[in-house]
Image (cartoon, coloured by chain):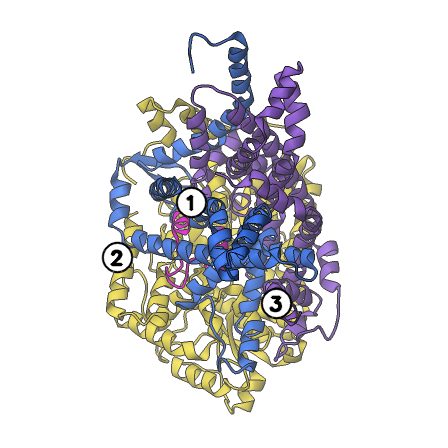
Chain colours: A yellow, B purple, C blue
Amino acid sequence: MKNQSQFGQSISRRGALKGLAATTAMASLPTSVLAQDTTIRWWSPQGAPAQVDAYMAQIAAFEAANPGVKVVFETTSDEGYAPQLAAAFSSGEVPDIVTHLPSFAIQSYYANGLVEPFNDVIEAIGADDYYDGANDVFKAADGNYVGTGIGNSAANMLWLRTDLMEEAGIAEAPRTWDELRAACQAMQKNGIFGAPLPYGRNSMTTLIFVGVIHQAGGQVFDTDLNVALDNQATRDALEFYASMRELCPPGATNYSWGEAITAFVSGATATGIYTGRVLGNVNAQNPPIADSVTCVRYPTKSEDIPAWTFNDFPSVFIPKQSRNIETAKAFAASLFNPDGYIQQLHAAPGHVLPVLKSINENPQYQANEIIQKYPEEVELMSQAAAGGFNLGYESAAHPSNEKAGEVVGSGAIADMVQRVVLNGENVDQVIGETTKTIEDIMAG
Amino acid sequence: MLKKIVFNLFAWSIVLMVAFPLFWMLVTSVKPQFELFSRPPTILPQNFTLEHYWKLLSDTNFLGYFWNSVILSTTTTIVVVAIATVGSYSLVRFRYRGRETLAFLVLFTYLLPSVVLILPLYLMLVNLGLSNTITSLVIAYTTFALPYALWLLRSFMAGIPEDLESAALVDGASRLGAFWDVILPQLLPGIISTALFTFILSWNEYLYALVLVNSDDARPLTTGVMNMLISSFNIEWSLLMAASVMMSVPLIIAFAFLQSYLTRGFGAGGVKG
Amino acid sequence: MTQPTKTLLERRYSMLGLLLIAPTVLVFCAVIVYPLVSAVYLSLFKIFTPTLEGSWVGLDNYRTLLAKGEFWTSLRNNLIWTVGTLSLQILFGVGMALVLHQNIWFRSLARSLILFPYFISTVVAVLVWKWLFNDLYGILNHLMMSAGLIAWPIDYLGSMPNAMISVILVGAWKYFPFVVIAVLARLQTIPEQLYEAARIDGAGPIARFFDVTLPQLRDVLVVIIMLRAIWDFKEFDLIFLLTGGGPVTSTQTLPLLVYKEAFALNQMGMASAYAVIMMLIMLVFMIVYIRRTRQEGS
């Protein structure tokens, strides 16, 4: 952003609307007197009851070790965090620590000077303990780390029902799109649909389709962050996605994460696309199919294209405006203490995977019913997630993309899918317009 | 006679169609989760259960949100109706410069979409030290509730004969005395009706609550329920329907009793423009 | 009003009047005028929402938005939605009020049930309808399939024109009771003599409706239409929660576009510009509407 000036200043310079100037200028100042007792506000969009219980245990441990400090946990949501954080940042009333937001969201906030560098916290946790490259996605243009991963997630695993595969005479898990399509066709009967792919106007469609583009051998941005959609790979991806439409439930046009997992877990679809949370949900809600559930990495166009796993890199970061940065950093580091961290991971086994080697090897972590029941699946997801990427970080060769959050938020990619698949618009024209839209956002 | 029966059946079938979602919400809320996934769907529950209600009350913060909503809506209603009552009295019964302009401005403020007001409003509330409190929502809700309340009450006020007030004044009452003794009792149906509308508006608001409040201590039901139960990890329809029932039942009971006020009040002078 | 003949009492009355209106004016300035002025002001900047940092761009935002296809499609959607849902609300609302005005069985229970959709939260309404519309387990698809009307589940919210129709229908269902309330109240005040006079003149039920009832309802309808048109035009919650504006941008109305610009694209300045334009459109409509109804009335 060229010619940047503090909004408040530019107003007072113009001498107009003094009231507005006063309020916005005041907004950047701390409004409360520093108290003896510090309260830390912790936001996360991951608020499943079991997870919240685990957070509470971690909070209790930290409070016991740090008398006078109180930690308040507040849930936000995947669709709601953007306006809530916007309001918080602009007013200065920020949470002191935010977890489980996708990595690209923080990159965007950091680029605008809203996030505290995280280097010392990573050191405190133990930089050597991370899987190799686990923090690369959090590296900003200036070389600092903007946050760290609180877990890994493999968002686009292909979930399969071995019982239905057997019935349909499918011996092996599909490796290519053609095999996947054939398998879905074979299993789509008796009111069961083939797959619950999302065609909705939401972030899931965007994120999953970014994966599909890569599974076709393409990419959204090239390594100089120019939009690179206008090629055969994107066309192949759209063609594949369109061909899957008839194998998905009619309401898939509105599917997001919740609907997608519910469709597979309830047994309405023969395959699924989701993280490891499927394991816990199947065992809790639909035990009859629990023994015939497995997962593989999502198929690609042809065997010579490697699988591409979408990892949104659930994160931890600390807003710069926090008035308790030091305490927040201490608390952030404490989240990785084995006892509490393992409990947090166990709250959704297989969904959030450990980022620390020592935790994965820890017998206490392995001693979970679900993890023991599905050791191969969990191991596969751990590997896939560790080698995963997302739109803010499409490959190891890509620099971090500060605008990825806005690109996802704009829904441009989901719009592209909907226009081609649902409206049957001309592919060339749609790709051209989508390229233009994303370029505009990048030029921002 | 036959005509009457046919008409009644016709009328009631429409009523039942309109109310069907209410029925379906109730029925779904007492079905266990696995029954929802049976095909074809069962109409009446085969396994009756209250577990979702129990889960809602014991495992979640539903009651907390409920209580917040009650306080929030009641306070908003009282504040808005009080300001609007004296305001409308002034607008209708007094003569001063700018009165007509004010009345027009009231109407104009209707046009403001909430999305526009939200950020400047939030900045202001933070500077008042009110962020993340129920008070901040009360203030925010006046933005849409006050213009409407004022406008409703203004037409009610216009419907009260001026002679009544004059008579009281001639008898030696002060202007405020006359307001208290003569106008207010006459205005009561209007006040109740306005209060009801205000209450409904604030009970149901979503967007402000989403952006302005992010603490469970102040979060009302609308965003509380969405946040708690609609998530990327699961959608439990029966739990959602149980929450919906519990969000709506208190309102329905209250309005069943006050319904006559709602209609009578609105007619007395409510919509004369 | 400043005639020299003004008595002391009158002056004291004006003072009192001003005093009584003071809280209203104060609240209006604080919570409405101030944010409004800010909105107009913000629309002249290019602003990153989370920081509110920005640079002066003058009228550029307005130029960009008027040249953008998205603005015009959203405006078109906004009009389709408003006109569609509003006419259904009025038609169904007046019809239902006429029915409920008759002496039917359990009239007050029927009235309560009819008013119910208006009381419940938009959130609740959306949840219930999403569940009714559900593709796999929804009762609507099931009933229609077992009645043989359709062979395959309908996708109510994810394809066009279904999505727009569904949104309009749910909107009509949610808000028609408002019309019922107002019309019913007015019906109760129509003097019975008017109907008797008409009956003596030999008018049938339909003629009575057009000759007696409708003219009596005119005033109330003029006001309801204006109120509901404004509310429907700026409706956000219902559409946002039901379809989020999809598929593509087929149900994206202006308020959703404002929200997207402000919070998904972090362009507060642009969002404010959209909002200001939106207000202007409503203002023009309202003025034209008031003029015309006044003329016809007199």
Q: Which residue is mark 2?
A: A436
Residue A159 on the magenta span = no
Q: Which mark is residue B7?
A: 3
How packed mark 1 is, by other alpha carbons closer than 10 Å (few <14, some 14-19, many 20 or more), is many
Which numbered mark, 1 or 2, is in the foreground of this view? Answer: 2
The picture places residue A357, in percent across and down from the top left corner, at 55, 61
Three-letter amino acid code at the position of disc 3: Phe
Which numbered mark, 1 or 3, is in the foreground of this view? Answer: 3
- In the image, residue B133 sits, relative to residue C9, either above or below, namely below
Q: Nearer the viewer, residue A315 or C71?
A: C71
Q: Nearer the viewer, residue A174 or B35?
A: B35
Three-letter amino acid code at the position of disc 2: Lys
Residue C247 on the magenta span = yes
Report the span colored magenta. C237-260
Q: Which residue is mark 1?
A: A109
Q: Nearer the viewer, residue B13 or A234?
A: B13
How packed mark 2 is, by other alpha carbons closer than 10 Å (few <14, some 14-19, many 20 or more), is some
- In the image, residue B228 sits, relative to residue B27, either above or below, namely above
